[in-house]
Structure formats: structure tokens, C-alpha cells
Image (cartoon, helix red, strand yellow):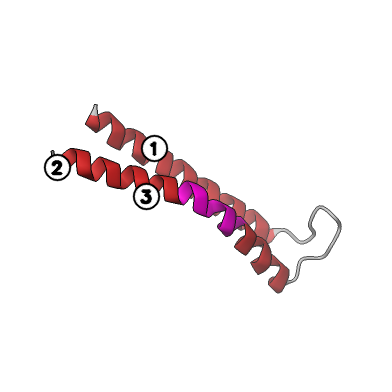
């Protein structure tokens, strides 16, 4: 059971990491956003900052799950 939890944790972590990187790359590489506004480097950084703020929630869940796995594996 515990080994399966570690494997599942690794898969989910890889999924979130790939999702974060791909969306961040999309936000950085796009020239125009959905409203037609030309993206300057400042606007791109703000967009990535907002995306990162929303990404904190799954990151906290992953950290909690990691700590849970560490505690259970020591028993």
C-alpha cells in the first residue's frame, strides 16, 4: 500500500510539474492574449505570477502528501 502511494505521488507530481511548465511556457511565448492585448515582458511576468499564485494550492497538497508518505514509511 505504501509503495503504491509513493508511486502515485511521483506520477501526480510529474503531472503537475509538466502542467506548470507547459502553461508557463505558453504564457511566456504568446504574443497576444485573448482580449487582443499585445503581451509585453511585464504583462507576461504578471500572467505567470497569477498562474503561480493559483498553483500554490496543488503544491501545498503535494507537500502534505509527501510528509504523510515520509511519516508512514518510517513506521
Left or right position of 20 against 63 = right
Left or right: 33 in relation to 41: right
* 30 in relation to 3, above or below: below
Sequence-wise first label, 1 or 2: 1
Query: Could you say where residue 58 lies in the image, as x and y percent from the top left?
Result: 48, 46
Tag shown at residue 11: 1
- Residue 4 image point, x, y percent: 28, 29
The residue under label 3 is 63
Position of the C terminus by quadrant: top left
Cα distance between the residues tagged 1 and 2:
21 Å
Q: Nearer the viewer, residue 71 or 26?
A: 71
- Whichever of callouts 2 and 3 sits on the residue coming sooner in the sequence is 3
Q: Quadrant of the N terminus?
A: top left
Quote the CA–CA distance across marks 1 and 3: 14 Å
Q: Residue furthest right?
A: 36
Residues shaded magenta: 51-59
Q: Secondary structure at mark 3?
A: helix
The question of residue 56 being in magenta is answered with: yes
Question: CB atoms at circles 1 and 2 under 8 Å apart?
Answer: no
**Magenta span includes 21:** no
Instruction: Give the residue at x 69% y 72%.
Output: 41
Disc number lying in front (1 or 3) = 3
Q: Position of residue 22 (x, y in %)?
A: 57, 50
Please, what secondary structure does the residue beneath circle 1 have?
A: helix
Residue beneath disc 2? 74
Q: Residue at x 26, y 41 (%)?
A: 69
Amino acid at each position: 500500500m505504501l509503495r503504491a502511494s509513493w508511486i502515485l505521488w511521483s506520477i501526480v507530481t510529474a503531472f503537475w510539474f509538466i502542467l506548470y511548465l507547459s502553461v508557463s511556457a505558453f504564457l511566456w511565448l504568446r504574443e497576444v492574449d485573448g482580449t487582443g492585448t499585445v503581451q509585453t515582458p511585464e504583462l507576461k511576468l504578471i500572467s505567470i505570477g497569477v498562474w503561480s499564485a493559483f498553483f500554490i494550492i496543488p503544491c501545498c497538497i503535494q507537500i502534505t502528501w509527501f510528509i504523510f508518505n515520509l511519516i508512514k514509511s518510517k513506521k
